[in-house]
Image (cartoon, grey):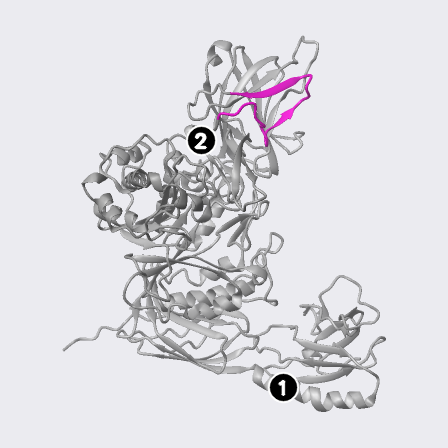
Amino acid sequence: MRNKTDPDQELWRWWDPTRRFPNGRREMECEACVRPPDTNHCKPNRTAPIPPTATRLCHRRPSAPSMTSAYMIGSAQPSLVLVVDAFSLAWSPGCYCESMMCVEGASSGALCLVFMLFVVPHCLSQKLEANLSALLTIDASPQSNHMIPETLFGIFFEEINHAGAGGIWAELVSNRGKLNTHPVISEEKFYVTTLVDLAIGFEAGGPSTPSNIDPWAIIGNESSIYVSTERTSCFTRNEVALKMEVLCGDGESVACPDGVGIYNPGFWGMNIEEKKVYNLILYLRSPDSIDISVSLTSSDGLLKLASTNIVADASDVSNWTRVELQLEAIATDRTARLQLTTTKKGIIWFDQVSLIPLDTYKGHGFRKELISMVEDLKPRFIRFPGGCFVEGEWLRNAFRWRETIGPWEERPGHFGDVWMYWTDDGLGYLEFLQVFVVVMVCCSFLRTLVQPPYGYSTMELAIRIKWILPAFLLLCRHDVLDSIEFARGSPDSKWGSVRAEMGHPEPFQLEYVAVGNEDCWKKNYRGQSTTAVEEMTGENAEVDLPNWDESLWASIILSRATIISHIHAGMTWNYLKFYYAIKAVYPDIKIISNCDGSSSPLDHPADFYDYHVYTSASNLFKRNNQFDRTSRTGPKAFVSEYAVTGSDAGKGSLLASLGEAAFLIGVERNSDVVSMASYAPLFVNTNDRRWNPDAIVFDSWQQYGTPSYWMQYFFRESSGATFHPSKVQTNSSSLVASAITWQDPADNQNYLRIKVVNFGKDSVSLKISINGLESAINSFGSTTILTSDNLMDENSFALPNKVVPVSSVLPNAGTAMDVVIAPQALTSFNLPLAAAEFRSAI
């Protein structure tokens, strides 16, 4: 039935008593509602028919937090239902959906009396406690603050979830000619024991032929075309090419008027857009004249989006010939493919086929919209390619920095056997250095690991190669020094000249080297032999080494001001050997240990230590004080990987972002001992989720940020800002806060920013008191809130902005404010400061 109230304050609620709890009680579900603009009445926002058993409830919407109201309602099913609604929040516009408790009871009047006498008073008492109060005091006096490091917040890129290949790297051809490797997993062990070469492109990435050309596919049948692979390419490091033998043609017994050939579907479809231009490069040869149709088509090949022809005499293509042309699309298709077809009988060899849109991020070959999302975070460093990808399960599948530089046609690529897919390494060492210098990020990270030619896993190698230790470590040292020289050496140096020849004569600033990736627990990581250290830094260090063809891999962190070189030494004998070897040649470089020093001092020398944390939302919230008791002397922390994972995270939930925000407030507060922090992982291609959650989700043409991405927006200006101590006084343990002042370089306006995470279910009446601030606060500021109706709400392609920051004007801003903090939300108050008045010392 309907509760009689003022129509202007009515709220319609629909309850479905047909849904039952496991114990048989019926659950009364609240449907979302909206207030139509043409009426003062709220209507249910639903398209499905109202169940015939539903009961309609209407009650007054309070204009301020109020005591609980109880209503007796009836329906066709339950004989007694008690509904207790929680208070409505004063700022909620229009209709609102409260938390309701609905239970089916008996028809007994006595039971009704029990409910009214005991349950309702209990709910009323809970209601009185719901609106918590708290006091936030901020000490903004100059003597109390500290400067936050310029490099505090950045990003971590790992080649996982097809983040690079089929992701930020704009190459549209999937496996443009790379040989893949297929892992064979031992049933007795948990790591890869055997590798079988499996070509999934047709480039000369390895010795095995014939090979599978997947994902390339054939257009035609066996009577009209035969395709195979041969080791006949012109590229010495990539010998395998595709041989296409066309058996049909004009005047032949078998005709092929529509053409036969091959096609590539890209990474789950190529995004081809109308009026955009795409640059195609391929290598071919043929003993005969050729007429090849190059087309961008729909996924079934029936609709042509762009097309041109390659026509040449036999004399022009008898040797390997590079062909470059451009295709302009006349229509849009998000799942298009590239076709190479002909109607002419003959043999054609193809190799190294590449298709990239001309419109890439600042011309550097990156997908614009994805890099723009990274740029919007204003990162001060980027670490790449990072994590497990850099080392691999097997050393032969590790990332090697030397093999990712130079012409893309000569890069052999490799199989990432941790995340189980192939990368062609078109996205290489220099590409990352260049693009993030253009983005103006602030800290570069280079991680390297030598790859000796042994078939042991990373962990096994640390134990089994004692006999080759001296030469092996010397090789590591030489390779590390070469990688450093490539990044920061002068154009006249050996590796600096290689960089200059690739178009970047200016050195990158490299200031840090981190040794290890979650390897501190491995045997002999820290080592024991002082003699060995002396050997590494003494006269015997400059001995001749064998010509190792297998070299190293790298992970990069990159910035406007600094670069960090990160050696993966989990399989080495001694962290100290790397430490002293690098310090001997580059004493200015800071070394980052892989061992956690946040709770107890390290037992070895280091300038920084690495800290990783993946845990539940509540646990990460509690870890906001992780570094409160860390020693203020000694190495500083690099929190290179943090995230909420597991059931709390889903594919990127509001709940996860709140736990992470609280942790970052703790990092901000302890930024005198924490120098850098980055979320992980950064990207996921929705077609290949290897890890949940991630910050940015994308497919071939669209993208969105998860709540964890938008959470980082609140910390964009923290790097290089001034931190002000603050204290929250409350009886709740669900509130954390911080305060900074920062300057917007666009207009040189100074701001005071207060961030508050309310992890609880209750709103909080917060009194803010700011003391010692040298500048006056302008009366109008702004409030930004990240929240949603449900803690597990996520964004999606259908609803990309379901959980995003929402800003509003904050009137009457000042050094004393009374505000309401929404439950389960991250709230930021941004207060513009007036120009400081000049005070004479006389």
Q: Quadrant of the N terminus?
A: bottom right
Q: Residue at x 53, y 16 (%)?
A: 311
Q: Crowdedness of circle 1 by 10 Å Cα count: few (<14), some, many (20+)? A: some
Which kind of residue does numbered mark 1 sit on? Met
Percent position (x, y) of residue 645?
A: 53, 59
Q: Earlier in the sequence, mark 1 or mark 2?
A: 1
Q: Quadrant of the C terminus?
A: bottom left
On the rendered structure, is 700 left or right of 51? left
Percent position (x, y) of residue 793?
A: 60, 62
773 or 704, nearer to the observer: 704
Which kind of residue does numbered mark 2 sit on? Pro
Q: Residue at x 26, y 74 (%)?
A: 143
63 or 441, nearer to the observer: 441
Q: Residue at x 66, y 72 (%)?
A: 97
Label disc, if present, on residue 67 of the rendered structure: 1
Question: Which residue position holds label 2?
Answer: 412
713 or 492, nearer to the observer: 492
**In the rendered image, which quarter is residue 673 located in?**
bottom left
**In the rendered image, which quarter is residue 688 located in?**
top right
Q: Is residue 216 magenta?
A: yes
Say which of marks 1 and 2 sits in front: 2
> Is residue 526 at least partly visible in the picture?
yes
Q: Which residues are magenta?
A: 207-230
On the rendered structure, is 732 left or right of 187? left
Local secondary structure at mark 1: loop
> Is residue 331 at least partly visible in the picture?
no
Local secondary structure at mark 2: loop
